[in-house]
Amino acid sequence: MGGYIPAKPMTAESRAGRDGTPRPNSVAAALMRGYVVASSGARGRTLGTDGNYTGKAPSVIVDLKSAIAYLKANDTLMAGRADRIIANGTSAGGAMSLLLGASGNSMDYHAEL
């Protein structure tokens, strides 16, 4: 989600490190430590055919909050506990993780949800 572009859900596939050897990504690292991982996609800004960026706020945060609402609504149907959710990311993903935590159960995005 760097640069607030659309994000696809992550998988546990390894990536090559700087030296070319495979290294686990954050999903694989969390799974190896016993965490349950749910990785959602999110809308973001997209380069339009006219060369301008499109995508309206707050779609990215609404998508992530929707994913959390889904996990909470289905808590009894899946492994793990939906009352112990960790959000992480770097760059724009880090900003979105911070916004998720800072807005918590606020009604700020309720209309969009």
Image: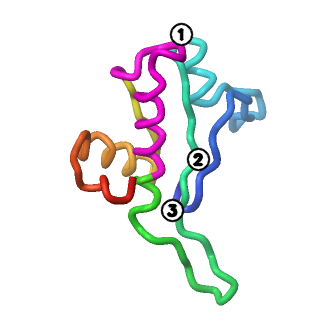
Front-lying residue, 38 or 10: 38
In the rendered view, does 20 fall on the left or right side of 48? Answer: right
Front-lying residue, 88 or 62: 62
Front-lying residue, 20 or 41: 41
Distance (Cα) linking label 1 and label 3: 30 Å
Amino acid beneath label 2: Gly
**Disc 3 element:** helix
The residue that disc 1 covers is 34
Question: Compared to 73, does 66 lie above or below?
Answer: below
Question: x, y (%) of residue 9?
Answer: 63, 41
In the rendered view, does 39 fall on the left or right side of 63? Answer: right
Among the two numbered marks 1 and 3 on one chain, the one whose residue lies closer to the N terminus: 3
The residue that disc 3 covers is 3
Q: Residue furthest top?
A: 34
In the rendered view, does 91 fall on the left or right side of 48? Answer: left
The residue that disc 2 covers is 41
Amino acid beneath label 3: Gly
Query: Is there CB contact under 8 Å for labels 2 and 3?
Result: no
Question: x, y (%) of residue 49?
Answer: 69, 84
Mark 3 is surrounded, within 10 Å at the Cα level, by few (under 14), some (14 to 19) or many (20 or more) other residues, namely few
Mark 1 is surrounded, within 10 Å at the Cα level, by few (under 14), some (14 to 19) or many (20 or more) other residues, namely few
Query: For the point 59% across and 17% down, which residue is it?
Result: 31
Residue range in magenta is 63-84
